[in-house]
């Protein structure tokens, strides 16, 4: 199985992130639309033909998935398990304040920490992995999601230590390709930026 993980294209909030956990519902900027088109064209040139294109229900992810799906001949379907991490009672707090708290924790605790009423990175990754497991027999699957869920899903699938999770980077409209074979996942590339 080939698993393509795509982060949505650029939004205005990406240019000036201020609030945690970035789960606003703003649309793509013109640059974000261009990024998505570049990624779609690149995937098409690579011969990617997913059985399903699934996306977070957030507007930015749906717009990105629509552009990808049109290029790849597959209508996208929304799935709430691909949405941004739930910040619970910390929703709307300044991101610098949240980052300072989380980065003050020991590395083994950062990805297990959940804001009050919210979810941890580990739990966030778990819901994506559950979705992926439902499609494990497919040849190609394409998912459009957000930074934190992608970071957590990749770390979980690769069975990587938490210290590695923070090294995964996902630029807007980037492509991550994981392959599943013999009961194990391997990364072909992570966070490949959009290309014209």
Image (cartoon, helix red, strand yellow):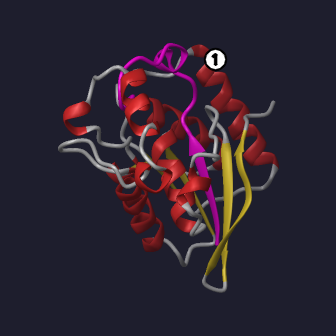
Judge from the rendering whether residue 147 lies leftward or rightward of residue 97; answer left or right. Answer: right
Where, by quadrant of the figure, is residue 91 drawn?
Answer: top left
The number of numbered discs placed on residues in the rendered structure image is: 1
Check disc 1 and report the residue beneath it.
31
Task: Name the quarter where the N terminus is drawn.
Answer: bottom right
Where, by quadrant of the figure, is residue 186 drawn?
Answer: bottom right
The residues colored magenta run 1-22
Task: Name the quarter where the C terminus is drawn.
Answer: top right
Residue 52 appears anywhere in the view:
no
Position in image of residue 38 (x %, y %): 73, 32
Q: Is residue 37 above or below residue 131?
A: above
Residue 180 appears anywhere in the view:
yes
Report the front residue among 154 and 12: 154
Judge from the rendering whether residue 2 lies leftward or rightward of residue 41; answer left or right. Answer: left
Neighbour class for label 1 at 10 Å: few (<14), some, many (≥20)? few
Q: Is residue 33 above or below residue 188?
A: above
Residue 65 drawn in magenta: no
Residue at horizontal 73 percent and vertical 36 percent from the top: 193
Report the front residue among 171 and 48: 171
Q: Is residue 9 above or below residue 187?
A: above
Position in image of residue 145 (x %, y %): 48, 44
Residue at horizontal 43 percent and vertical 48 percent from the top: 110
Position in image of residue 127 (x %, y %): 37, 60
Judge from the rendering whether residue 70 lies leftward or rightward of residue 114; answer left or right. Answer: right
Residue at horizontal 19 percent and vertical 34 percent from the top: 89
Judge from the rendering whether residue 144 lies leftward or rightward of residue 34; answer left or right. Answer: left
Residue at horizontal 80 percent and vertical 52 percent from the top: 46
User: SS for tag 1?
Assistant: helix
Position in image of residue 78 (x %, y %): 38, 48
Residue 15 drawn in magenta: yes
């Amino acid at each position: 199985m080939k698993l393509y993980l795509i982060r949505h294209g650029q939004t205005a909030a990406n240019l000036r992130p201020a609030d945690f956990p970035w789960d606003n519902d703003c649309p793509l900027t013109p640059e974000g639309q261009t990024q998505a088109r570049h990624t779609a064209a690149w995937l098409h040139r690579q011969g990617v033909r997913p059985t399903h294109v699934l996306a977070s229900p957030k507007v930015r992810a749906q717009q990105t998935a629509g552009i990808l799906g049109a290029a790849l001949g597959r209508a996208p379907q929304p799935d709430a398990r691909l949405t941004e991490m739930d910040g619970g009672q910390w929703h709307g707090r300044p991101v610098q304040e949240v980052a300072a708290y989380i980065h003050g924790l020991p590395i083994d605790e950062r990805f297990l920490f959940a804001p009050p009423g919210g979810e941890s990175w580990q739990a966030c990754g778990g819901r994506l992995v559950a979705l992926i497991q439902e499609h494990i027999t497919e040849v190609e699957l394409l998912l459009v999601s957000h930074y934190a869920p992608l970071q957590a899903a990749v770390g979980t699938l690769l069975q990587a230590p938490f210290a590695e999770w923070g090294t995964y980077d996902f630029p807007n409209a980037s492509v991550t390709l994981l392959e599943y074979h013999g009961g194990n996942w391997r990364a072909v590339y992570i966070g490949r930026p959009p290309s014209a």
